[in-house]
Image (cartoon, grey):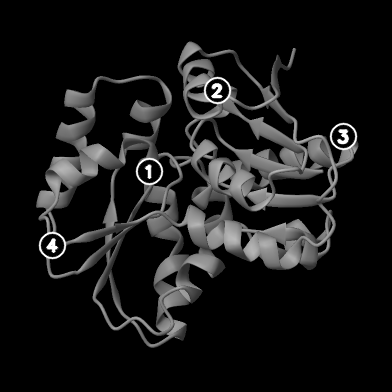
C-alpha cells in the first residue's frame, strides 16, 4: 500500500498523479486538517507532526510513502524519514522537482509557503545543479485554499505576492501542493509567457521508479483526516469521483 501525507487537501494534486502511475495500487491518504496549514509551523512542530503521520501509516501496513507536503519535505532531514522507513520507500517533493530541471536553461522562480522558502531547501538544491532561482513566499495562501476562501481573495493574495517580485523568470514552480488546486488563478495573474510547473508530475514519476511492487491490489483509496471539512470532501469528490474510496475522520 502507498501512503500519502499532507496537511490537508494539497496532497490531492499529488495523489491524482500517483493514481495515473499506479492505477491498481491501494492508497492511504493522511490529511492533517486539524493542524493545517503547515506553512507557518516551526521546525519542531513539523518534526512532531511528520513523525505522527509516518507512525500512523506504518501502523496501517503502508510500505511506501510519498510526503506530499513541501513544508515537510523542505524542513525535515531525510534521516527523520529513515528512522521509520528506508530511503527507497520514501519520495519527497524537493529532489524530484529540482532534478527535472537538470537540462533546463530557463530562469526559475519557486513560490511556496514561508516555511519552505525560509528552509532554503529549494535554493540549495537548485544551487547544486548550478541554477540560481527567484523565491516567492505567499503567506496565508495554503490556508485560504484549504478552508475554502473565495477565488477573489485567493487572487488578491497571489497578485500581492507576485507583484512584489520582478518577473525575471520563465518558469514558476508551484512548490506547495495546495497551489496547483488553484492553478487557473495563478494563470490569470501571470504573464502568458511564464510556464507554470506542478511538481506532482516529477514526484509521481520518481515514485514509479522506486515503488516496484504496487500492482495487483484493488485500487482503493482510503482518506483519513484529523478533522472533518466540507471543502476537503468536496475536492475528493471532484477529483476522484470515479474512484473506489472511503473517508474516515480520526477521533
Q: Which mark is first along the chain, 1 or 3? A: 3
Between residues 163 and 195, which one lies in front from this camera angle?
A: 195
Q: Which mark is first along the chain, 2 or 1? A: 1
Marks 3 and 4, how far apart at CA? 45 Å
Name the residue at 20% across, 69% down: 170
Residue pointed to by mark 1: 180
Image location (x, y in percent) of residue 14: 54, 46
Q: Is residue 8 above or below residue 228?
A: below
- Tell me the SS state at disc 3: loop
Image location (x, y in percent) of residue 35: 56, 28
Is 142 situated left or right of 209 in this image? left
Residue pointed to by mark 3: 60
Q: Which mark is residue 193?
A: 4
Contact flag, marks 4 and 1 (Cβ < 8 Å)? no
Residue pointed to by mark 2: 241
Q: Which mark is first along the chain, 3 or 2? A: 3
Q: Which mark is first along the chain, 1 or 4? A: 1
Quadrant of the drawing holding the N terminus: top right
Name the residue at 43% across, 67% down: 122
10 Å neighbourhood of mark 2: few (<14), some, or many (≥20)? Answer: few
State which mark lies toward you, 3 or 4: 4
State which mark lies toward you, 1 or 2: 2
Q: Which mark is residue 132?
A: none
Amino acid at each position: 500500500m502507498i501512503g500519502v501525507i499532507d496537511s490537508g487537501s494539497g496532497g490531492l494534486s499529488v495523489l491524482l498523479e500517483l493514481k495515473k502511475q499506479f492505477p491498481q495500487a491501494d492508497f492511504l491518504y493522511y490529511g492533517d486538517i486539524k493542524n493545517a496549514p503547515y506553512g507557518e509551523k516551526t521546525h519542531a512542530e513539523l518534526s512532531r507532526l511528520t513523525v505522527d503521520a509516518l507512525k500512523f501509516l506504518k501502523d496501517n501496513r503502508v510500505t511506501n510513502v510519498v510526503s506530499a507536503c513541501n513544508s515537510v519535505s523542505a524542513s525535515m532531514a531525510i534521516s527523520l524519514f529513515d528512522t521509520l522507513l528506508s530511503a527507497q520507500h520514501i519520495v519527497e517533493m524537493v529532489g524530484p522537482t529540482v532534478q527535472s530541471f537538470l537540462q533546463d536553461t530557463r530562469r526559475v522562480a519557486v513560490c511556496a509557503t514561508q516555511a519552505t522558502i525560509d528552509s532554503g531547501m529549494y535554493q540549495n538544491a537548485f544551487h547544486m545543479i548550478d541554477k540560481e532561482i527567484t523565491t516567492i513566499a505567499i503567506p496565508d495562501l495554503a490556508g485560504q485554499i484549504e478552508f475554502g476562501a473565495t477565488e477573489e481573495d485567493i487572487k488578491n493574495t497571489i497578485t500581492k505576492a507576485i507583484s512584489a517580485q520582478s518577473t525575471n523568470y520563465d518558469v514558476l514552480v508551484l512548490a506547495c501542493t495546495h497551489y496547483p488546486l488553484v492553478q487557473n488563478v495563478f494563470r490569470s495573474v501571470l504573464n502568458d509567457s511564464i510556464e507554470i510547473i506542478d511538481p506532482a508530475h516529477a514526484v509521481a514519476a520518481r515514485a514509479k521508479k522506486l515503488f516496484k511492487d504496487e500492482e495487483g491490489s484493488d485500487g482503493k483509496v482510503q482518506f483519513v483526516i484529523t478533522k472533518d471539512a466540507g471543502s476537503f470532501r468536496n475536492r475528493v469528490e471532484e477529483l476522484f469521483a470515479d474512484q473506489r474510496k472511503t473517508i474516515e475522520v480520526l477521533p
